[in-house]
Amino acid sequence: MRLWALLPLGLSVDLGHEAAARLDGCAQLLLETRGARNHEEELMSCRVPLLGSLHEDRVPGYLYNATEDCHFWASYAARDRHVEGSSVLDFSRLAAFRLSAPFEPPLRRNGTALYVGAHRLGEDGVEFQRRFGLQMHLFEPSPTYFKSLQRSLASWPGFTLHNYGLGSKTRVARLQLSGTASRVVDPEEVVDEAVSEAVSEAALAGGPEDTEAVWIRAAAEAIPEVLGSEEVELLHVNCEGCEYDVVQGLAQAQQLPRIAQIQVATHLLEFRGPSSDFQEAVALSLQVSTQRYCEMHRLLARTHRRVWGLPWVWERWTRK
């Protein structure tokens, strides 16, 4: 873990008196032990002050490094009952930063934004368009949710709706519909690109109940078509696990450098292999998710710097 001698100590996340009082001691423990497993119990008792200050990379004496430290923090930040029960680390409180935290540099008015995972109403996109006058491109692969999105926003100025998702490959997949947490259930199913012009119900009829066929387009193919040579002010992603494939696709297409600000909600992936019991399945899910999460961080760190965020909530990255 990297030392950083001149970090400011002020925190936008209010740690509260008890956690703030413990922060210096916990930071010293972190730096001395470097996250070693034989100090796991002591470190776990420091999760609230350390995670609360990591949110804006203000752990005293420490600077986050995506290459060296990501696996430690992704595991350390697992949202168990202790984390979920903390007012400092409350999910809704931290997620609100995506809309309330000022952008630096500020978003250019009338600039272009991409919102991946707009769902039924595209609420975050509506807020960004209202506040910053952005030209919003909303991506929603579900035919069912897209109909709702069209009813809500198709006639609004400043919005362009796209009935497909973004990823590293063009393919047809199946999306499991589940309230606000729908996700792709067969992420590796690649099909002939000719099929991708329309998601044919006949081609994929007979899938599992509560799923539907969706179209995912390779970022290398879709982004130049949608944007031409335009710069992108904001990429906003909330797609229940597809975020890793979205960033991978943009990186492969060399599109990340054209994006000024990136906001991503990160999610645990479901482990689909065999496991002996529920606890092992949870541990394996965290392991798989951490691998994908840290691969994404390494890609983002090449062109952007992390501004705030925690694993399994929301985070923002700004172009270097």
Image: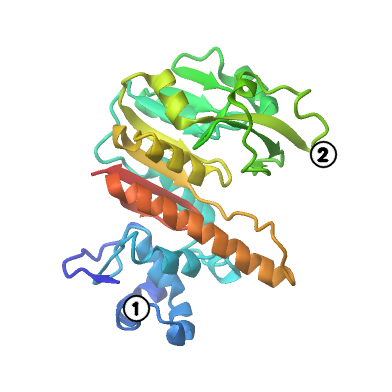
Residue corresponding to mark 1: 34
Mark 2 / mark 1, whichever is N-terminal: 1
Numbered tag placed on residue 62 in the rendering: none
Give the residue type that dot 1 points to: Arg
Image quadrant where one finds the N terminus: bottom left
Locate residue 8, reporting x and y percent: 21, 63
Q: Secondary structure at mark 1?
A: loop
Residue corresponding to mark 2: 209
The residue shown at (31%, 63%) is: 64
Give the residue type that dot 2 points to: Glu
The residue shown at (30%, 32%) is: 258
Q: How many other residues sit within 10 Å of disc 1, few (<14), some (14-19) or many (≥20)?
A: some
Give the vertical position of 21 relative to 290 (above or below).
below
Locate residue 197, reporting x and y percent: 61, 18
Q: Nearer the viewer, residue 163 or 55?
A: 163
Q: Secondary structure at mark 2?
A: loop
Give the vertical position of 192 relative to 92 (above or below).
above
The residue shown at (69%, 56%) is: 272
Give the vertical position of 269 relative to 86 (above or below).
above
> Label 2 to label 1, Cα distance in Å?
47 Å
**Label 2–label 1 contact, CB within 8 A:** no
